[in-house]
Image (cartoon, rainbow, N blue to C red):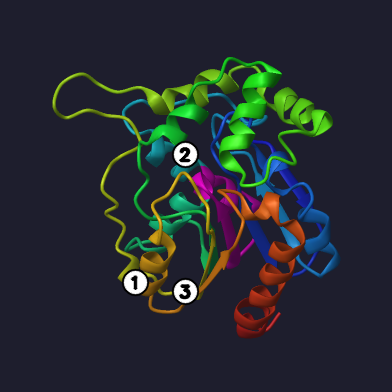
Amino acid sequence: MRTHVLEEGSGPPVVLLHSGEYGACAESSWSGLIPELAAAGYHVVAPDWLGFGRTDKVVDFADPTGRRVRHMAATIAALDLGPAAVVGNSMGGTYLAKDIAAAAPAFGAVAAVLVSGGGFVPDNDARQAILDYDLTEAGMARILRTLLYSPRLADDPEYVAWRHRLSLEPGAWACAASARLRTPGPAAGGEFGKADATAYENVRVPTLVVAGADDPLRLPGYADEVAARIPDAELLTYPECGHMPNVEHPERFRDDLLSFLERRYRKEVGR
C-alpha cells in the first residue's frame, strides 16, 4: 500500500496519528505542531491512515479498524523508529488506546497521548452532522462548526477552503463515508454507538489524556473515566473546547505535549 508520511526533525521519535472526519489527514491534524516538535528536538513522523490523505484509498469491510491498525503498525515498523511516543487525535486516539491496552501492542509506544480518543463513541446528532458531507465548502464549514467549540475557524474562508481541498483527494470521501454503513438486522454494523471494550487497566505506558470540556462527539465525563482506569495517566480537560484540542488550542496543546514528553518520555528513555 502506498503510504504518505510527513517527517521532520531528529531525536527521540514521536508518531502523530490523525483524526477520521472527512478531509482528515496528517496535514489537517498536525501541520502546525510538526515543526514545533522538531524544533524542540524530536524526530516527528505523521502518516496518513489507510483510506485517508494521500495514502491508498482502501477499506476492508470485513475488518476496517483492524486493517487500518495493521497497516499503521507496518508503516511504523518500516520507518524503523524504535520505541516511540505516540500521539493520537479522535480516531487516531481511539485506535491508539486499543493498541496500548492490547496484550501485544503493535505501535511500539513507550508513552501515549490520547486527544479526544477512547471511551464510548455515541451515534448522536453531532456524529450524524459530520457524517453527512456533500463535498461543498458549506458542508465542510458545518463539519467544523460541529467539531469545534468556537466558530472562529468555521468562519474563516481560507481555513475552510484549505480543509475543503484536503477532502477532495480522490477516494477520500468514499473511504470516510464507509464508517456510516450498517448491515441490516439486529446485529447492526457500523463503527459508532458500540460499547467500549478497551481494557484500559492493561495499559503499561505513561499516558496523557487530553479532552475538550465541550466535546459534542463524546459523553460528558468520558475522559475522567478513561484516565481513572489507566494505571499511569494524567488528564487535562480544556474549557471552551470541542473535539479537536490540538486544532482549537494549538499553543496550549503544544506546551502540554512538550511538558509530558520531557517528563515522561525523553527522561525515562534517556534520549
Query: Disc 2 on helix, strand or loop?
Result: helix
- Label 1, residues with CA under 10 Å away: few <14, some 14-19, many ≥20: some
Asked if the magenta segment contains residue 8, the reply would be no
Q: Earlier in the sequence, mark 1 or mark 2?
A: 2
Pointer 1 with pointer 2, Cβ within 8 A? no
Is 29 positioned to the left or the right of 159 in the image?
Answer: left
Nearer to us of marks 1 and 3 is 1
Q: Quadrant of residue 165?
A: top right
Distance CA(mark 2)–CA(mark 3): 22 Å
Query: Disc 3 on helix, strand or loop?
Result: loop
The residue that disc 1 covers is 229
Amino acid identity at mark 1: Arg
Query: Disc 1 on helix, strand or loop?
Result: helix
Q: Quadrant of residue 136?
A: top right
Residue 160: % across, % down: 75, 29
The residue that disc 3 covers is 205
Pointer 1 with pointer 3, Cβ within 8 A? no
Where does the magenta region start and end?
72-92
- The numbered mark at residue 106 is none
Up-down: is 60 above or below 243?
above
Amino acid identity at mark 3: Val
Distance CA(mark 1)–CA(mark 2): 25 Å
Tell me which residue sits at (67%, 28%) in the image: 141
Nearest to the observer: residue 238 or residue 207: 238
Nearer to us of marks 1 and 2 is 1
Q: Earlier in the sequence, mark 1 or mark 3?
A: 3
Amino acid identity at mark 2: Arg
Is 101 positioned to the left or the right of 155 in the image?
Answer: left
The residue that disc 2 covers is 68
Tell me which residue sits at (63%, 35%) in the image: 144
Give the mark count: 3
Residue 106: % across, % down: 45, 56
